[in-house]
Image (cartoon, rainbow, N blue to C red):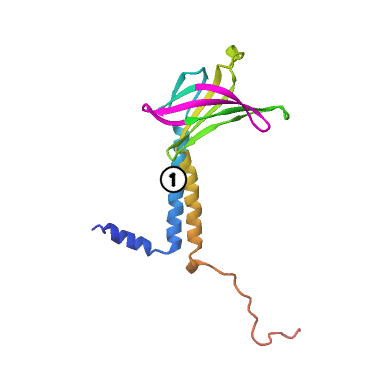
Amino acid sequence: MEAPLSETLRRARNLPRASQGMTLAHVGLAVAMIGMIGSSAWKSEEIVFVTPGTDVTIAGFDVTFTGAERLRGPNYIADRGRLEVRRDGEPVTTLYPERRSYPVAQSTTTESAIRSTLAGDLYASISEPASEDAASGEAWTLRILYEPLVNFIWLGALMLVAGGALSLSDRRLRVGVPRRTRPHGDLRLPAE
């Protein structure tokens, strides 16, 4: 005989907080494992040379490189790419990855652009202009990475922490430090 959903919820609500916390933490571990497995098993990556108008398809996304522009920051010079992202022909987002040069420190870094959702993260970065067309600055090396379910790892970790906190909040199972007791009366024995 099956209990109705309302009865099941009532029973779950009446469980001790330690049991509720344990259940939440175990579900969090399962969610984190789904994220770890999914992000490693179905990860996609493309590294291509692009010029304005080049389309790249990755994990169901159509990414169009529309060009790059030079910008000046407070202490750097940046080449910022513009990527139009579509799925099934519908616009999803625009990503702006950057390649920054810091003249004073004489270093170069890459600032990835990220589109993050619960379903997965789409990363894009540009590096130096491709050697065959470096003079015009039109051809770039583009790296696009899609990692599905990666945010499940963080969601699972939060559920683990919340489950642990909920479990520790149950005062019924808390064990205190034992008290020292003094013996009653004088228990000194004479030396022989």
- Position of residue 119 measured from the top left corner of the image (x, y, whole percent): 42, 38
Check disc 1 and give the amino acid type: Val
Q: Compared to 147, does 167 lie above or below?
A: below
Magenta span: chief secondary structure: strand
Q: Viewer-proximal residue, 155 or 26?
A: 155
Viewer can see residue 59:
no
Q: Viewer-proximal residue, 6 or 179?
A: 6
- Position of residue 147 measured from the top left corner of the image (x, y, whole percent): 47, 33
Q: Compared to 138, does 87 lie above or below?
A: below
Viewer can see residue 11:
yes
Left or right of 37: which side holds 134? right
Q: Viewer-proximal residue, 144 or 105?
A: 105
- At mark 1, the secondary structure is helix
Please give the range of residues in magenta.
66-93
Tell me the residue that label 1 is attached to: 31
Among the 4 quarters of the image, the one containing residue 175? bottom right
- Position of residue 163 measured from the top left corner of the image (x, y, whole percent): 47, 55
Q: Residues within 10 Å of mark 1 (few under 14, many from 20)?
A: many
Q: Is residue 84 magenta?
A: yes
Among the 4 quarters of the image, the one containing residue 16? bottom left
